Each structure stands twice: as structure tokens, then as C-alpha cells.
Image (tube, grey):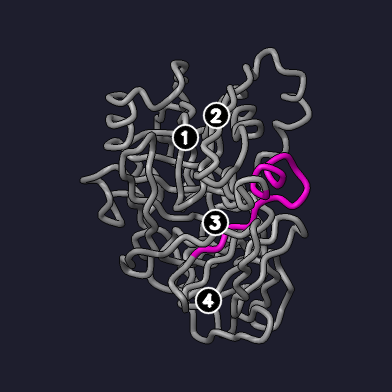
Amino acid sequence: MDSLALSRRRLAAMLALGLGGVLPATARPAPLDLPDPAQDPLVEATKKAVDRRLTVQVLINDAGPYPFLIDTGANASVISRDLAVSLDLPRRSPVTFHSIAGAELVETVGVDRLTVGRRTRRGMRMSVLPSRYIRSAGVLGLDWLGSQGLVLDFARNQMRLGSVVRRTDSLSVTVPIVSQRNGLHLIDASVVGASVTAFLDTGSTTTVGNTALMHQTLRRRAASRDWADIQLLSLTGQVLQGRLAALKSLELGNLKLGNVPVVFGPVHTFEYWGLTARPAILIGVDVLDVFESVALDFNRGQVHFRLPSSSTSREAALDAATS
């Protein structure tokens, strides 16, 4: 999934301030009201901190390291044009690249060796995209990740690859992966009690809903009354019109999130993965980073969420677990 460059300050502020809290669903708290960004004094301090995506250090043909994103919503890996040129990587045949706004023919280059930690992948072909849209040296997609475990440790600002250690204390919640679709791992979710298909996208700064979810949200009055028209900018520079609202609640297994900012629209990503017929949501880093950590445990078919260890959410979680 793309890094979404958001065109309005209101949206940036809502994404920075958006989540009212994270609690086990059994606690059933009343969702907190989303503050008005135009009047909230925290807007100026937080609007620059929207992008909380984590990176890993990558060697390209033994050069580097360079910071790369890992994108669990992308089928193909990407390298920035600036880095490809500086390393004088050989050109390969163009490929069709799928972004939020549609499909586009893009250049590719060949990489003899791509190394992260102890793992080396040989003979890769990577799509080449403008550096200003990627906002990193490159992106590793599902074609590289495969079945490796992935831990997003927001508390330590680290991303780790490899086996995942499952925690079973009161601050850890496990959600099963219910199905796979060409490498994309899907989990069950619900919005105000209505079933929704969800997947985690570690490469997206923004949580996005498909058109079917927008219609369901309107029918069930599941979002705030204030909607904003915005523009999304894809990794290829294409622009997509969308609408922003805050979902009153989003449940992932036994977790309940309140006041979740979501951009709705005809996002091509859902079409590519065959997720247009029923309500679906792509969960971006703006939601994931309210947790202390998120671990994608593909071997066990589970996602492990760890609640913040020093917050009111922690106290509520402990109360719920011992009640």
C-alpha cells in the first residue's frame, strides 16, 4: 500500500490526534470525542509527526545500509529513483505497478543481492519510483517478506524480522488471521457491530476504507457527522479523491478502538486484492502506532497487539482482566 500524502491540514491533525483510546472490547468504554483540530492547541505540535512508519537497514549489492520500509499491503518491492541511479543498477523490462489510484507502467532495475540482517535475497527485480513520493530509500513488499514474522516495536522505534515470541499477559491481545489472499493476510473486524474484512498495512500512514464500507458506515451512522473532502497522493504521483470521517468504533478481536480516522474512496488497492464486494478496511500505521507493539506471526496465523504499558489504557486493561 502507498504512503498517502494528505493534502489538508485538518486531515493531518485528525490523523495525529485521532484515536481516543485502546481498550479490550469487554471493557466497552464510550468512545472519546475527537477534538476539533482547528481549535486544539496540540495541532501545531503533532501535525508533523503523522508518519510513524518504521524502517529496516538494507544492503544493496553490499552497498549501504539504506533505510527501507516494509509494506505488508504491497505485492512488489520498490527502490527510489535516486538510489537506483546512484548505484548504477541495470535496467530491466517495465512492469505494471498497482497503487491506490490505479495501475501504471513503471521502470524496473535488477538487484544482484539484497540483504537485511542475515537474510540475503538474490536476483531481485525492483520497481523504480520517484524518491519524493516514497519518502525512504525503498519499500520491501510481500514478494520479499514471504512468511517471515514481523514485529513493529513502536515503543523502541524498531522493526524486527524473524520468529515472533507470543506474550500472554493482560496487556497482550491476539487476533487470528482468518485467511490469505495471494500473500495478503486478512483478519476479522467489525464497525459498530457490522462485520468487516481487515488487513494491516505497515507501509501506509493512513487507515483507508473501501466504498462498500463507506456506504455501510453511512447507513448505520457509524461515523462522526463531520466529513471532509481530501486528496490522496500515491507513490507514483497520481491523485485520488477521498472523504475523511472518524469511525465511532472499530473492533479487532477483543480490542475496541474509538474515534478512528478513516479515508474512504474508490481505492485501487481493494480492487487489486479482490476486496470490493464487501466492506473492507486497510489499517495503517496511524492506528497501529497507538500500541506498544504489533507482531505479525505468520507461522501461527496470528497478530499480537500489545497495549501501552504506561497509560490510562493500561489501567483499564488491567481492571478488565481482573474483574
The 10 Å Cα crowd at callout 2, few under 14, some 14 to 19, many 20 or more, is some
Circle 1 — which element?
A: strand
Q: Which residue shows up at 47% across the image and 68% down it? A: 302
Tag 3 residue: 202
Mark 1 or mark 4: whose residue is earlier in sequence: 4
Q: Residue 91: percent from the left, percent from the top? A: 48, 72
| Contact between labelled residues 3 and 1, with CB atoms less than 8 Å apart | no
Circle 2 — which element?
A: loop
| Contact between labelled residues 4 and 1, with CB atoms less than 8 Å apart | no
Q: Quadrant of residue 37?
A: top right
Q: Residue 176: percent from the left, percent from the top? A: 42, 64
Identity of the residue furthest to the left in this view: 277
Q: Residue 209: percent from the left, percent from the top? A: 39, 39
Q: CA distance from mark 1 to mark 2?
A: 7 Å
Q: CA distance from mark 1 to mark 3?
A: 21 Å
Which kind of residue does numbered mark 1 sit on?
Ser
* Residue 249: assigned label: 1
Mark 2 or mark 3: whose residue is earlier in sequence: 2
* Residue 233 is inside the magenta segment: no
Q: Which residue shows up at 25% across the image and 55% down it? A: 274
Which kind of residue does numbered mark 2 sit on?
Pro
Tag 2 residue: 31
